Image: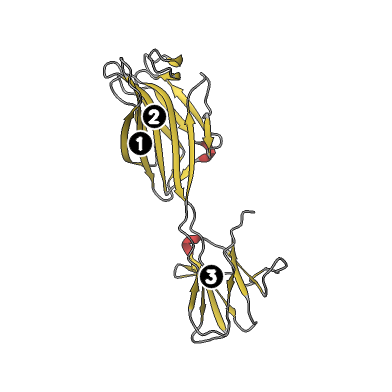
Amino acid sequence: MKTQTLKHLTLALAAGSGLLALTPAAPAAAARTATWRFEAADAAAPEVNAGFPGATAQVSPGQGGLGWMASFPDSSGAVGTHDLGNQGRVTADLASGSIIGPAQITVRVRQWFDGWIFSQLAAVAVPGATLSTASVGQMKPSTVGSWLVSENVFEVPAGAVVSRVEISSSTSGGVVDEVSVSTTAPLPEAPVLAIEVSAENPGEITLSWSETAGPATVESTGGLGPDAGWEALELEPQLVNGRYQVTVSSTDGARYFRLRR
């Protein structure tokens, strides 16, 4: 079972009313990436995969498309490319690595551009997300054209699910050498335990944390150390005004509390 334990909190039960809370560092972002280099004709799985289990790519050339080519006739030495032809498509299926918002997705596509035959960049779409920014960078140019890397950044709203990325060539055709999908998403909020001694009834204390941090179990012990016997409170936390809370007696001497989920 996956658990997360908040730092132990010490209660001075003889103290007056007040509020004690811990403020953790801001949650970091969880990053994942998958890159398809198409080094082999049947390379459906990404050559680089960090966080997208089962991800695959399907390539469907359009009219006039030659499909997979071991090399491209230019001076760059590119290995493994797909000639998509007229409105061909590359679909990156993220499978069980689907992205749940809020999140940000960056799609990079390395594609050939010569301003003559291949004069339009492939379109990138992420169903369930909204395009935020788009930019293009140039690789080393040759005498007949150059490889460009388009970068499209998409925003996934909270609760939305993204399971695929689509790259479509224009009517003038398109040659794609590499597709990379990466995403960052904020980690779930860490619960911050607040401890409040009742001003009206000094024999009671209320433990609470934000609803946005999700449910957790409150555990208690009379002492710290390797042999500390942590036990879950019998009372179930109740959701009140956007906070989980539970009220306990403060007449049992010094106690320590922690959250576990």
* Residue 56: percent from left, percent from top: 51, 30
Picture residue at 44% right of the left edge, 42% below the top: 183
In the image, 76 versus 258, the foreground residue is 76
- Asked if the residue at tag 3 contacts the one at tag 2, i.e. Cβ–Cβ closer than 8 Å, the answer is no
Work out how far the residue at label 2 is from the one at label 3, CA to CA, in angstroms.
Answer: 49 Å
- Disc 1 element: strand
Work out how far the residue at label 3 is from the one at label 1, CA to CA, in angstroms.
Answer: 44 Å
Q: Give the mark, 3 or 1, whose residue is nearer the N terminus.
A: 1
Indicate whether 119 appears above or below 149.
above
Indicate whether 202 appears above or below 66.
below
Q: Which disc is residue 152 wearing? A: 1
Q: Give the mark, 2 or 3, whose residue is nearer the N terminus.
A: 2
Which residue is disc 3 drawn over? 238
- Disc 3 element: strand
* Residue 243: percent from left, percent from top: 48, 68
Query: Is 224 situated left or right of 175 in this image?
Result: right
- Asked if the residue at tag 2 contacts the one at tag 1, i.e. Cβ–Cβ closer than 8 Å, the answer is yes
- At label 3, counting other C-alpha atoms closer than 10 Å, the crowd grade (few under 14, some 14-19, many 20 or more) is some
- At label 2, counting other C-alpha atoms closer than 10 Å, the crowd grade (few under 14, some 14-19, many 20 or more) is many
Amino acid carrying mark 2 in the image = Val
* Of labels 2 and 3, the one closer to you: 2
Picture residue at 52% right of the left edge, 40% below the top: 97
Which residue is disc 2 drawn over? 109
Image quadrant of residue 155? top left
